Amino acid sequence: MTNTTQKKLRIGVLALQGDFEAHLKMLEKLGVEGIAVRLPRHLTDLDGIILPGGESTAIGKLMVLYGLQEPLQQMIRAGFPVWGTCAGLILLASETDNALAGQPLLASMHIRVRRNTFGSQRESFETDLSVPALGEAAFHAFFIRGPSVEWVGPEVEALATLDDGTIVAVREGHLLGTAFHPEVVQANGQRDLRFHQYFLRIVQSVRG
Ligand code: GLN
């Protein structure tokens, strides 16, 4: 089947707190239907979901309050495609070095992350990343009090590292994680849509 005859992809963006509007804008640019997910009923008929950056503690608490934690965990176990960016990556990780006690998480991807790794001066920074999975051109990445990936399981592929070897983008089958913010508009006003396109390819491959 060609794209024109296929049903339009429906991608959810967890819209409890954080940078969800920017992801919805990216999806709109890509001609995909973006759904703001706030309640369990919004999960119906989605092809994938993006967990945005923000504050993982706040997002986690709201996720429990609105009854989204369990359905999401079940969907992930069943192979549902999920992309966590920054705080979203913390939610996805099976282990967190420095989670707050009782911080609600999805704990699904076989990685260990460290919150707020790039302390003091480097709390927020931008850098050009080499991401071979996206092609040759560097990806200009915005790190905003982001986590680092400290350990990856045998099934996890590191998609990008900083110059010092710190892993900042990972994939484990239908799960994708980035420690930075690919939804942020570049200084020249352009949007680099390649990470979102990469996630859509994962979604397509799962949908078949
Ligand atoms: N520091 C935040 C947290 O630990 C993540 C920052 C972000 O998503 N930009 O949740």
Image (cartoon, grey):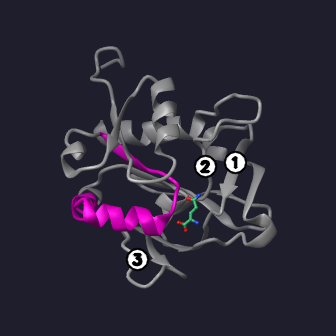
Q: Is residue 155 visible?
A: no
The residue shown at (73%, 72%) is 119
Could you say which quadrant of the image residue 165 lies in? bottom right
- Write down the residue under mark 1: 141
Q: Residues within 10 Å of mark 3 (few under 14, many from 20)?
A: few
The residue shown at (35%, 68%) is 61
On residue 103, which mark appears?
3
Closest to the camera, between mark 2 and mark 3, is: 3
The amino acid on which the numbered mark 2 sits, given as a three-letter code, is His
Residue 151: x and y in percent read 57, 75
> Which mark is first along the chain, 3 or 1?
3
Q: Is residue 6 visible?
A: yes
The amino acid on which the numbered mark 3 sits, given as a three-letter code, is Gln
Q: Residues within 10 Å of mark 1 (few under 14, many from 20)?
A: many
Residue 2: x and y in percent read 34, 17
3D distance between C-alphas at marks 1 and 2? 7 Å
Q: Secondary structure at mark 3?
A: loop
- Write down the residue under mark 2: 181
Q: Which residues are magenta?
A: 47-74
Could you say which quadrant of the image residue 161 lies in? bottom right
The amino acid on which the numbered mark 1 sits, given as a three-letter code, is Ala
> Which of these two is toward me, 113 or 5?
113
> Which mark is first along the chain, 2 or 1?
1
